[in-house]
Amino acid sequence: MILKGIYYSRTRVADRCAECGGDDVRRYPAFTARGPKFVVKCQHCLALLREEEPNIEEAHPPFWPLTRQWDCTRAG
């Protein structure tokens, strides 16, 4: 996965997919509508197993906006 010259790897997770029972489950950074997250997805059926909040040490995204962790409103 490439984001403006920054390479992210997909880390294998010791978990099984609840949808298809596959064992190729990976954890990687993604940008969602709710902000940057780490997603854990099955690589066979692409089922989303869970989303995790990144911490500062994981450097995703490579910059942190000032509004990080502010409460959202219905307007956005």
Image: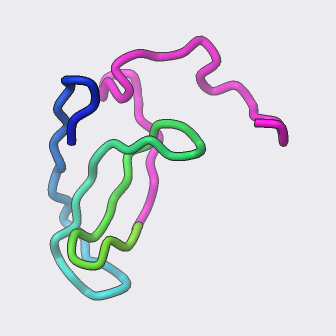
- What residue do we see at 17% from left, 32% from top? 7
In the image, taking residue 25 as reference, residue 29 lies left or right, namely: right
User: Which quadrant of the structure image shows residue 42?
Assistant: bottom left
Q: How many marks?
A: 0
In the image, taking residue 73 as reference, residue 67 lies left or right, namely: left
Secondary structure mainly formed by the magenta segment:
loop
* Residue 23 percent across, percent down from the top left: 17, 76
* Residue 69 percent across, percent down from the top left: 63, 27
Judge whether residue 29 is colored magenta: no
- What residue do we see at 41% from left, 67% from top? 48
Judge whether residue 67 is colored magenta: yes
In the image, taking residue 17 as reference, residue 54 lies left or right, namely: right
The furthest residue to the bottom: 20
Residue nearest the observer in this picture, 3 or 53: 3
Magenta-drawn segment: 49-76
- What residue do we see at 75% from left, 34% from top? 72
User: Which quadrant of the structure image shows residue 68?
Assistant: top right
Q: Quarter of the image for the C terminus: give it.
A: top right
- What residue do we see at 50% from left, 46% from top? 32
Q: Quarter of the image for the N terminus: give it.
A: top left
Query: 66 above or below 50?
Result: above
* Residue 14 percent across, percent down from the top left: 18, 65
